[in-house]
Amino acid sequence: MPSLDPKLVLASASPRRAELLERAGYVFDIIPAAVDESRRQMESVCDYVRRLALEKSEAVASNHRDRVVIGADTVVSVDRVMLGKPQDIADAIRMLKLLAGRTHEVTTGLALRLGETYLAATEVTSVSFTGISDDLIGWYASTGEPIDKAGAYGVQGIASRFVTRIEGSYTNVVGLPIELVERLLRKLVTSPIQNF
């Protein structure tokens, strides 16, 4: 199958998403999208991340109609409480205390768009954390790793020591479900439809 990679655009400034795509062998340009990430009233986690992924892909695709644009948004949720990126170390500590010793969900909305045609889907992965002492939480928060990550942790980094179980896509927990990217990409270029 001929490579479609030179036509790809990642509508995200996330270094983790870029690294995942690069490691999977994709060739792409990075053009971050600026969209309002406010959550709408009564909007579910899945609806929220899917909408943002669509808005990000649309924002970039408006100036790149001949390219396949990848938009994505990832959040962590526990007991229906959505955890985005922490505002500071204290906020990171608060989030990590919510996750310690419990199972939470990592949900990514993904949208691939080529001109007016798009495909969108969500990926949900369950992640279980071991119990974590307050001292260890404080130390981890002070490393700086949690600050720019949804749920205040990076599963591919220091926080890997807290993870007891992952059910679903590992790359989704990092920030981009690569298998879903591939599946939507092949579907988009072979049989375009408006939704998946």
Image: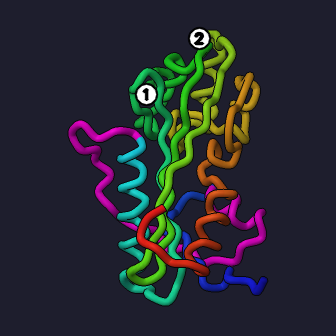
- Report the residue at 52% width, 84% height from top: 67
Reading the image, the residue beneath label 1 is 91
Give the left or right position of residue 174, taking residue 54 as reference: right
Residue 86: x %, y % from top left: 45, 35
Residue 129: x %, y % from top left: 65, 21
Prevailing secondary structure of the magenta residues: loop
Q: Of the residues shown, which amino acid type is indicated by label 1?
A: Asp
In terms of sequence position, does the residue under pointer 1 or pointer 2 come before the other? 1
Q: Nearer the viewer, residue 165 or 96?
A: 165
Residue 38: x %, y % from top left: 28, 47
Which residue reaches farthest left? 41
> Image height check: is 34 above or below 89?
below
Give the left or right position of residue 177, taking residue 64 as reference: right
**Residue 102, numbered circle:** none
- Report the residue at 70% width, 60% height from top: 19
* In magenta stretch: residue 43: yes
Q: Which residues are magenta?
A: 17-45
Reading the image, the residue beneath label 2 is 134
Q: Residues within 10 Å of mark 1 (few under 14, many from 20)?
A: some
- Report the residue at 64% width, 39% height from top: 154
